[in-house]
Amino acid sequence: MLMYWLLFIITSGMALSFSRKQQYQIMPLLLLGAFFILIIGFRDRVGGDWYNYIGHYDDMTYLTLSDALLKGDPAHQFLNYLSNRWDLGVYGTNVVYGVIFMIGLIKFSRLQLYPWIAIAVAVPYLIIVVVMGYSRQGVAIGLFLWGISYLNRGNFKMYIVFILLASLFHKTALLLLPLGIFLYGKGMTLRILMIVPVAFGAWDLLLAKEQENLWQNYVEVQMMSDGAKIRVAMNFLPALLLFKYKNEWKKSFNDYSFWFWIAIGSLLSVGLVNFASTAVDRVALYFIPIQLAVFARLPYLARHQIASSTTKLLIVAYYGLVLFVWLIFATHSQYWIPYHNILL
């Protein structure tokens, strides 16, 4: 448990103490990234799906590469295959996942007004729970963040590339493809014409054969996720704040349309979570970046109502409470406690 608090204290301390100029210094971010990669990559017996992922790794002992790639989520299987052949254990795969995610997070965070707030907000749930628990979807979200960093610079093609890469780790990432058309108004028709054949081809290749099983397992049989309501509610607050500061956001930033649709998805998730909690919960994980984007800009957006320093303190306190409640009361937090690392 102490390790998780250390991760949060380091990042929140930087968020509160660094000036705006210091927030963008690359060396502290790189050092933090290296530290987090070690914590993510070399963790041992941490996460609710730990032994499932051990099974994925062990399966590679008896499979050829072609057979491994046919098991689904081919990038995940490929990394496990290489790690198995090179005798790196599941840690080899996890280190690569840690590297990909942290690059995506840092590149995304540096787009924000307060990068260290974005990282501190990511720690309690996105990093500790998702990246250290749902490894495949965690790396997919990292690639999503990485893709947003290109999209923010108007590079729509690279956004598509990163979402397609993400879908090779977790098929549901394909749902993120259409979001890219909303960042800028000009050229939307061309972006739609690009998206349609790419999305159709990727869907046919990765999901067409499984869509019936996915619908049956996640919706018709009513699979339920413990804590799903709380997780979707965490996206609800920043969605409301986005709408509250709509005019200021539009005046200061050029990406309102992109976050508007993620906010809409976040609000819909609250209404649909009772219908199929596991399905909604898994999709809503991709909306977590709205927490990073909104709270990393909130000290500026709300500056006329409350001092920026006070806003930053309230954000850190809120996510400290999130971490406390999850560690103490979450049903499955026992699978994260105590934290083990093969390097320690």
Image (spheres, rainbow, N blue to C red):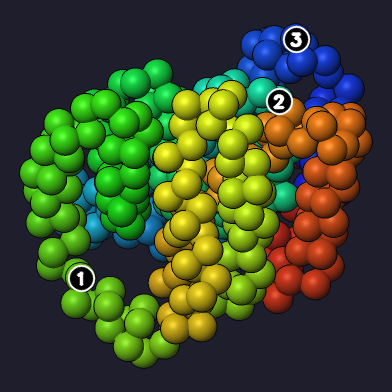
Q: Helix or strand or loop: what does disc 3 sit on?
A: helix
Q: Viewer-nearest of labels 1 and 3?
A: 3
Position of 240 with respect to 66 (left or right) is: right
Q: Residue at x 71, y 33 (%)?
A: 301
**Which mark is on residue 157?**
none
Residue 78 seen from this side: no
- Quadrant of the image containing the N terminus: bottom right
Q: Who is closer to the viewer here, 10 or 181?
A: 181
**Which mark is on residue 114?**
2
Q: What residue would you read off at disc 3?
A: 21
C-alpha separation, residue under disc 2 versus residue under disc 1: 40 Å
Give whichever of discs 1 and 3 has the lower sequence position.
Answer: 3
Residue 176 place in picture, x, y as percent? 34, 48
Position of 101 with respect to 298 (left or right) is: left
Residue 251 place in picture, x, y as percent? 57, 26
Residue 79 place in picture, x, y as percent? 34, 41
Q: Amino acid at mark 1?
A: Gln
Position of 106 with respect to 223 (left or right) is: right
- Quadrant of the image containing the C terminus: top right
Q: Residues within 10 Å of mark 2 (few under 14, many from 20)?
A: many
Q: Quadrant of residue 299?
A: top right
Q: Quadrant of residue 198?
A: top left
Position of 311 with respect to 154 (left or right) is: right
Q: Residue at x 31, y 53 (%)?
A: 175
Q: What residue would you read off at disc 1?
A: 211
Q: Helix or strand or loop: what does disc 1 sit on?
A: helix
